Amino acid sequence: MRRSAKALSETVQWDRDWGKRLAHLEAAQAQGFRVEALENRPQPPLNFGTVVQAMRDCAGDSGLAGIPFTSLAAWADRVGVDPFWLVDRVRTIEEAQRAVDDESTN
């Protein structure tokens, strides 16, 4: 696996494990508690947040799989990013998610 794909897989896995509890983890850390999950949080690749936000906004209730290119292109136009760049990054994240799923089932 390429280094960037590995970093992305680690970020996706961390988000699956801890993402829903992030506010609680940060609150505990702010109160002076040592929070190992935050200390070990992988650094997401550049622009990861932008791509994840696009995926969430465009997926709706149907989930992330199969987001139509037209939805991503319209989102990209609204925020001023290259739609082809966005689609490429979405595909990369989807591949990383599949890799994490494959590892967890083996």
Image (spheres, rainbow, N blue to C red):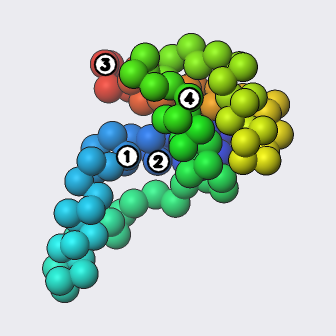
Q: Is residue 56 above or below residue 37?
A: above
Quadrant in which the N terminus appears: top right
Q: Residues within 10 Å of mark 3 (few under 14, many from 20)?
A: few
Mark 4 vs mark 2, CA separation in Å: 21 Å
Q: Which mark is residue 58?
A: 4
The answer to whether residue 8 shows anywhere in this view is: no
Q: Is residue 38 above or below residue 99?
A: below
Q: Quadrant of residue 52?
A: top right
Residue 102, image x, y percentages: 41, 20
Front tag of 1 and 3: 1
Q: Which mark is residue 105?
A: 3
Q: Which residue is label 1 attached to? A: 15
Q: Is the Cβ of the residue at disc 2 closer than 8 Å to that at disc 1?
A: yes
Q: Tell me the SS state at disc 4.
A: helix
**Image point 72% across, 30% down: which residue?**
74
Q: Which residue is label 2 attached to? A: 11
Q: Could you tell which of marks 1 and 3 lies nearer the N-terminus? A: 1
Amino acid, disc 4: Cys
Decide if residue 75 is on the left or right side of residue 97: right
Amino acid, disc 1: Asp
Residue 30, image x, y percentages: 24, 81
Front tag of 2 and 3: 2
Q: Quadrant of residue 29?
A: bottom left
Q: Is the Cβ of the residue at disc 2 closer than 8 Å to that at disc 3?
A: no
**Which of the two residues, 9 or 23, is positioned nearer the viewer here?**
23
Q: Tell me the SS state at disc 1.
A: helix
